[in-house]
């Protein structure tokens, strides 16, 4: 089956801009196919816009019938909405994910890789009914260093995602790619797991290694993640850590 009508759903400006730039540079990639870009109806992308493409608001749950009828391929490029099972069953759906499946599937993989040491990277895979779980089209590992924060690790992951997209877009659009089954079920982290990490228990007994790892895993400016509650005032105090590798 040829992918004639393609929908890219995203809530991430950096990936969207890269995708659009890639298509402009390699016009022949698209051929006679049509491609449309969509985001969540509340996404900031609708206000900020991007280059000169149109981005349409799509509620994947409410508009699932429309999406099934109008598209042959749906690509999630950091779409925050979970694709309904009906969509995944009826239309080929592909995900560009900022993690190395099957390790730390789900929310903010680099945060959890800093904490549990599981491999970090980027993956393009077919979507099935479970989160970041389907057959893998391509993936790239990225290294993690002792001086990384969530931010520096994420920047490396995004570069890997862009490289993967560039290398695999042709085979994805033309439906000529091959896949392999992930080695294992791996592990899954949800937003609630990330939120739990953010409140620091000032009485917890732990090593410097664990303390530094936790704080660097939660350092991702401009976001405010880690905090403690000042027992005197009851106020929240935000924490970030600064790590600097010796440049000599
Ligand atoms: O789009 P994305 O990079 O990725 C997230 C999930 O991790 C991913 O599994 C899912 N497929 C995708 C749809 O959503 O997330 P983001 O742009 O919201 O955040 C990027 C990074 O910024 C994140 O990895 C960690 C950091 N961040 C973000 C927020 C919102 C924080 O440190 N704190 C935050 O509150």
Image (cartoon, rainbow, N blue to C red):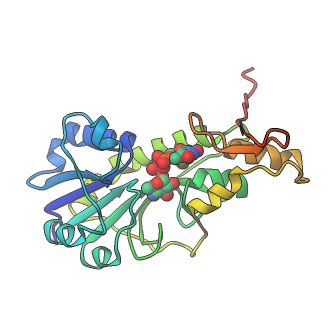
Rendered image quadrant of residue 197: bottom right
Q: In this view, does 167 lie to the left or right of 4?
A: right
Residue 225 percent location from the top left of the image: 64, 44
> What residue lies at 73% left-to-right and 29% top-to-bottom?
245
Q: Is residue 46 left or right of residue 223?
A: left
Task: Please state, as top left, top right, bottom left or bottom right, where the C terminus lies in the image.
Answer: top right
Q: Is residue 145 left or right of residue 40?
A: right
Residue nearer the viewer, 44 or 84:
44
Which residue in the rendered view is the most extreme toward the front? 233
Residue 236 percent location from the top left of the image: 72, 41
Rendered image quadrant of residue 73: bottom left
Task: Please state, as top left, top right, bottom left or bottom right, where the N terminus lies in the image.
Answer: bottom left
> What residue lies at 70% left-to-right and 36% top-to-bottom?
240
Residue 198 percent location from the top left of the image: 69, 50
Which residue in the rendered view is the most extreme toward the left? 32
> What residue lies at 55% left-to-right and 67% top-to-bottom?
102
> What residue lies at 29% left-to-right and 38% top-to-bottom?
47
Q: In this view, does 207 lie above or below 61?
A: above
């Amino acid at each position: 089956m040829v992918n004639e009508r393609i929908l890219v759903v995203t809530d991430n400006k950096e990936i969207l801009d890269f995708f659009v730039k890639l298509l402009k540079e390699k016009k022949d990639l698209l051929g006679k196919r049509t491609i449309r870009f969509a985001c969540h109806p509340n996404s900031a992308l609708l206000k900020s816009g991007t280059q000169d493409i149109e981005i349409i608001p799509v509620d994947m749950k409410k508009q699932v019938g429309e999406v099934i009828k109008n598209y042959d391929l749906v690509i999630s490029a950091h779409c925050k909405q979970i694709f309904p099972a009906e969509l995944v069953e009826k239309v080929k759906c592909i995900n560009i994910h900022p993690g190395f499946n099957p390790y730390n599937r789900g929310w903010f993989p680099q945060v959890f890789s800093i904490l549990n040491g599981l491999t970090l990277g980027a993956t393009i895979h077919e979507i099935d009914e479970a989160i970041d779980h389907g057959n893998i089209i391509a993936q790239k590992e990225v290294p993690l260093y002792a001086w990384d924060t969530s931010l520096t690790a994420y920047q490396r992951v995004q570069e890997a995602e862009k490289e993967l997209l560039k290398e695999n877009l042709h085979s994805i659009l033309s439906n000529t790619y091959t896949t392999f089954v992930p080695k294992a079920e791996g592990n899954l982290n949800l937003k609630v797991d990330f939120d739990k990490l953010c409140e620091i228990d000032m009485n917890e007994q732990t090593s410097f290694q664990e303390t530094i790892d936790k704080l660097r895993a939660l350092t991702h400016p401009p976001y405010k993640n880690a905090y403690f509650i000042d027992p005197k005032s009851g106020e929240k105090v935000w924490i970030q850590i600064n790590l600097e590798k010796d440049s000599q």
